[in-house]
Amino acid sequence: MHRRPALLTRPPGTPTTRPSRVPAAPAATVPGPRSAAGHGWYAPAALIVGLVLTGCTSSTPTPDPDTDGASTAATALAAALSKKDLTPLTFSGSTGTEANTELQALVRGMGPLAPAVTVRSLAATGGTATATMAYHWTFPGVAEPWDYAAPATLVREDGSWRPQWQPAVLEPSLDATHRLSQTRLYPDRGRVLGADDALVELRPVERIGLDKTAVSAARTPAAARRLARLVDIDAKAYAAKVAAAGPEAFVEAIVLRAGGPTPDGADVDAIPGALAIQDEQMLAPTRTFARPILGVVGEATKDEVDASAGAVTAGDEVGLSGLQKRYDEQLRGTPGVQVVRAALTPAAGASADPSAQSPSPSPSGSASPEPTTVLHRAAPVAGKDLTLTLNTGLQKLAERVLADTGPASALVALEPSTGAVLAAASGPGSGEQSVATLGQYPPGSTFKVVSSLALLRAGLQPSSRVSCPATVTVNGQRFKNYSDYPAGRLGRIALRTALANSCNTAFIGQRDQLEAGDLDEAAGSLGLGTDYDVGFPSFFGSVPAEKSDNARAAAMIGQARDEASPLAMAAVAASVQAGKTVVPHLVEGQTATSTAAPLTSREAEQLRAMMRGVVTEGSAGRVLGGVPGPAVIAKTGTAEYGKAKPPKTHAWMIAAQGDLAVAVFVADGKSGSATAGPLLREFLDGTR
């Protein structure tokens, strides 16, 4: 696998590289104690040597009476090093400005990071003092800090203590030819697994962007605009992004899936500095696969960095939406870091301007560049996988079924025996919204399953006779049945017949059989109207208690303020099929227990028989009649909304067959049986 070239770096201030896999540490290791001829110095060894030498002398040196002055000077040096700014100090043999110029060349490869420096110990003899400076470097999101000690010599000149500047003051092994450079080591991001396959895993991609080292500054703006037009992105925005990046940066324009449509390689090569890099990225099977639920991964925005409390830095990849964002900490893992002693080239030391150089080592021009020495390494820790209940085949099938549906739409499939979400697809008209799990719409006549349960609990039986007139008026408001309601099902009919044919007036006429809260309680028993935290963005519906007679009438048929998501209505069908209250779950280990009154086996048996009648003799017969396999139960729904005359309608259908429960929703659909029904039938047929 080809990786981004070493010279293609991020903008200054973010000394990072992003391999898809963590690179192995170089063969070089942290240097051990060095000889007197070397540049290294370690406080413990030096102190021991100092003590031995002191014990061997024939006379005891007189302690300097002005150790307080030496201590004050050492403390000021520590404070200046902590700020990476030596200009306020006066050094022995150099000015603060001169020393600071050298310091900036030494720490440029550390980016914006600065150490916390304190004085660990101080020993003064005569006009000379040695301070042991304790360094503590921390790295965003990295658990392990870098701690070490370095010596600093101070001398008393003209009655004042002044430090002597040399690179070893920053780190014991540094000299005039070496500097510090850190690289952030990115962990492998955790996969998102499904019930039968990996949903999000490393898949091949092509990263297309501009290598600013391969194009002159004068030609860069035009090259950026040409590349943007080639890959069909905003040319002005991309040109601005390129201009803001460092002089050695690779500025990504677009990432494309391998095997999909990509620009011709010759067209990319024809643009100065343009480059296509083969890489891998965490991706779902297709661009649209459960995208509103799974979410996307991308570079952390300023908001993500600011909200991370130091765990994320610019350049990190994080979850930006959906489950990738909610479980980002688990999936992201923990980054590592590697700090090396690298050659200090003339280019790296020529300017004190931090924006003038790359934070990565510059090429020395030698055929055999000096190898770097690792001073500190904290290994990254890979992210942990997240397991979902989604079935890859069923999710793809659901998305194919909705592919040609223009308005917002959704299809949710549950496993009644467990409540597992097998598919949760939002159609192309839904945009980036998870209509399947978060949609809030009046459920229309699918809600009559809830009303039927409430009436059964109020004492009615499926065979109880109820009145189904063509219209009914409540406080001056006229309610009617749908336009092609069968005339033969008007009059005194059984409650099961009223449900099978979806008689609005029959259910409205029974509203006085219920007390306040009865509808809400029945809804809860069917998994609707109770808020649960199941580990993913979801809306389980709302069934407010209505006060006016008109609103109570409308609520009986899924109107008024009744609201549900396709997920919640799938739970209604699943609860009836399973004979128990089903609370859907999607994330393994994140389940909720129903707090509603339990659905009894007797109630479920009665409802199953009534919903079976919707298929055998009622409004779903034309689309679901004759479906092979186990018996299908169903309920159609058409929900009016808005103030238009006539009002607009949403189309619903819920159904269950065997250990599968399905809800289909289409905004602005003609009717449940005409719009949602064929989609549900196509899905059931596709499962065979």
Image: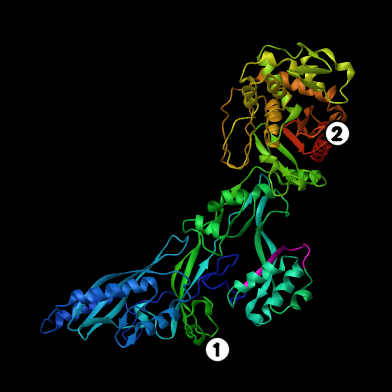
Q: Name the dominant secondary structure of the magenta segment.
A: strand
Report the coloring of the rendering: rainbow
Relative to 439, residue 106 above or below: below
Most foreground residue, 29 or 442: 442
Residue 298 picture location, percent across and down: 62, 59
> Residue at the location (28% across, 71% down)?
119
> Residue at the location (75% across, 77% down)?
269
Is residue 671 on the magenta stretch? Answer: no
Question: Label 1 is placed on what type of residue?
Answer: Ser
Most foreground residue, 346 or 355: 355
| Residue of label 1 | 366
Which portion, as a residue range, is magenta? 250-262
Residue 462 picture location, percent across and down: 75, 14
For this view, does 352 lie left or right of residue 266? left
Q: Residue furthest front?
A: 476
| Residue of label 2 | 674
> Residue at the location (68% across, 32% down)?
563
Relative to 31, residue 398 above or below: above
The answer to which image quadrant residue 496 occupies is top right
Q: Residue furthest left?
A: 59
